[in-house]
Image (cartoon, grey):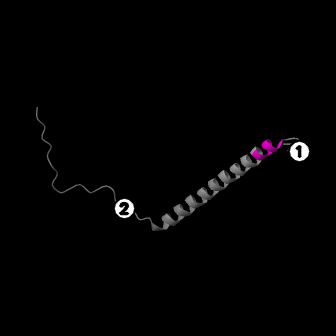
Amino acid sequence: MQTDSMRIGERILFILGMSLCGVLFFVLVVGVMVALLISWMNEEEEEIVKTIEPPSENPKRIVRKR
């Protein structure tokens, strides 16, 4: 892109746009890095937990009315 023939207003908008693009890219990259670090740190603390209870000794009878 030729910036020599642009007026001052167009140059300012161009610089602001490129700056905004750089900030968004930086936030995206840092966010991915933080998410990966958090997932790796939580991996060490995970434990196996039973989610299904064993069947009880005295099952309840289901009574249906007709």
The residue drawn where x is 70% and y is 49% is 21
The residue drawn where x is 83% and y is 41% is 7
Q: In the rendered image, which residue does mark 1 sit on? A: 4
* Callout 2 crowding tier (Cα within 10 Å): few <14, some 14–19, many ≥20: few
The residue drawn where x is 88% and y is 41% is 5
Q: Is residue 1 magenta?
A: no
Q: Position of residue 63 (x, y in %)?
A: 12, 41
Q: Does the magenta stretch include residue 9?
A: yes
Q: Position of residue 37 (x, y in %)?
A: 56, 63
The residue drawn where x is 63% and y is 53% is 28
* Callout 1 crowding tier (Cα within 10 Å): few <14, some 14–19, many ≥20: few
Chief secondary structure of the magenta portion: helix
Q: As shown in the figure, which amino acid type bears the numbered disc 2?
A: Val
* Quarter the N terminus occupies: top right
Marker count (numbered): 2
Is residue 66 placed above or below 56 in the rendered structure? above
Choose between 16 and 21: the one closer to the eye: 16
Q: Position of residue 56 (x, y in %)?
A: 20, 56
Residues in magenta? 7-12
